[in-house]
Image: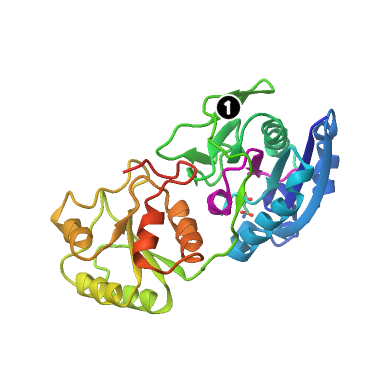
């Protein structure tokens, strides 16, 4: 019989009505007792790691989850992590870097409606997640609404429907149909995973709006080691307003700048337009290409936890991990 570890962290799936909004209150064992099928034909153990709305999840919680997997790695065939949907894509990306190349499935799931309500999607997501966790589905993935999405490619694209997640710039790994996992893509893995949980959390994100000025950017660079700018289209910054000087100044002080795009699909291509070209050619700004913003943020924290050397940072950033970007 397969052995699965269920790690609970909170989220809607485990939430109850407090009278002042939903909040996590159901334990991992409580989830299992409400979905009794999960315990049939397999051994399931539980860890009550956190009980948080995922809005409250912080990078130190990613580290807790990665360490929990590391401590239990030898004893289980697969892992199911229940998590709020709001920041699930960040956690999935972070785990893809912190637990690299896992031959065992590490499956994140959650729900749009709590497990205690009749219209819940919790049970179906849990059942699908357990099926994936005991199948040949290596690496980190999100299982949601019968889809299996690579951990580095997921994004929450619907705030209410069951179909909450999309796979961005990459096909789904598989689907679950009539209780069977149909795997389209098998993630590459190693014989053993590589655990590395050092993170530098001094990474910030600025979303560009028309008319933005450099002061916000200066503030973010001052307080962080890397700033990601979500710009427009294939990428660029306004030519007025001092952005180029701002970036040039902070780059000479060793800060990392990454351009990405607010457009969900197809990614950046900074050299195409005059507004982006110089950033890359002269100011050493990196670009996210087809990566999700969630993966960019998690990857930078993980890279900067290992090195601050700008050349090494750039090399590591452009080295694909768990197919987070297509090789350039
Ligand atoms: N606010 C919830 C959370 O992220 C939403 C959910 O789980 O669907 O924890």
- The quarter of the image holding the N terminus is top right
Residue 258 pos. (x, y %): 34, 60
Seen at 43% across and 67% down, the residue is 204
Between residue 171 and residue 78, name the one nearer to us: 78
**How many marks can you see?**
1
Q: Secondary structure at mark 1?
A: strand
Q: Where is 36 relative to 57, above or below?
A: above
Between 189 and 238, the residue placed more toward the observer is 189
The x, y position of residue 159, in whole percent, is 53, 47
Q: Residues within 10 Å of mark 1 (few under 14, many from 20)?
A: many
Q: Which residue is mark 1?
A: 175
- Say which residue appears at 59% left-offset and 58% top-offset: 196
**Left or right of residue 27, residue 326 in this image:** left
Task: Tell me: residue 96, above or below residue 121.
Answer: below
Which range of residues does the magenta coloring cover? 89-115
Residue farthest front in this picture: 191
Toward which corner of the image does residue 141 lie, by quadrant? top right
Residue 137 vs 117, above or below: the answer is above
Q: Quadrant of the C terminus?
A: top left
Q: Residue at x 49, y 63 (%)?
A: 301
Q: Is residue 294 above or below residue 139?
A: below
Residue 121 in picture, x, y percent from top left = 67, 37
- Asked whether residue 138 is in view, the answer is yes
- Left or right of residue 249: residue 94: right
Instruction: Check the image and name the residue furthest to the left.
Output: 274
């Amino acid at each position: 019989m397969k052995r699965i570890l269920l790690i609970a962290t909170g989220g809607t799936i485990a939430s109850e009505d407090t009278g002042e909004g939903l909040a996590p209150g159901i334990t991992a064992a409580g989830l299992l007792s409400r979905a009794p099928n999960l315990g049939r034909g397999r051994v399931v153990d539980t860890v009550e790691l956190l009980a948080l709305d995922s809005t409250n999840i912080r990078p130190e919680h990613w580290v807790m989850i990665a360490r929990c997997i590391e401590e239990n790695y030898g004893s289980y065939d697969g892992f199911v992590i229940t998590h709020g949907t709001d920041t699930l894509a960040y956690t999935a990306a972070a785990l893809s870097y912190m637990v690299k190349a896992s031959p065992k499935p590490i499956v994140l799931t959650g729900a749009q409606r709590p497990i205690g309500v009749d219209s819940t999607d919790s049970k179906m997501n849990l059942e699908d997640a357990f099926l994936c966790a005991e199948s040949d589905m290596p690496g980190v993935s999100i299982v949601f609404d019968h889809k299996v999405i690579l951990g580095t490619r997921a994004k929450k694209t619907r705030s209410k429907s069951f179909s909450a997640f999309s796979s961005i710039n990459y096909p789904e790994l598989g689907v679950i149909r009539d209780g069977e996992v149909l795997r389209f893509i098998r993630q590459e893995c190693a014989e053993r995973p590589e655990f590395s949980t050092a993170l530098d959390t001094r990474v910030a994100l600025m979303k560009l709006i028309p008319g933005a000025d450099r002061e916000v950017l200066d503030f973010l660079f001052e307080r962080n080691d890397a700033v990601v700018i979500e710009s427009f289209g294939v990428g660029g910054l306004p030519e007025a307003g001092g952005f180029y000087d701002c970036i040039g100044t902070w780059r000479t002080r060793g800060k990392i700048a990454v351009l990405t795009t607010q457009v969900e699909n197809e990614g950046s291509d900074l050299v195409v337009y005059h507004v982006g070209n110089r950033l890359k050619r002269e100011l050493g700004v990196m670009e996210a290409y087809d990566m999700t913003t969630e993966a960019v943020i998690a990857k930078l924290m993980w890279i900067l936890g290992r090195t601050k050397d700008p050349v090494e940072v750039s090399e590591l950033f452009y080295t694909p991990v768990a197919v987070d970007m297509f090789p350039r």
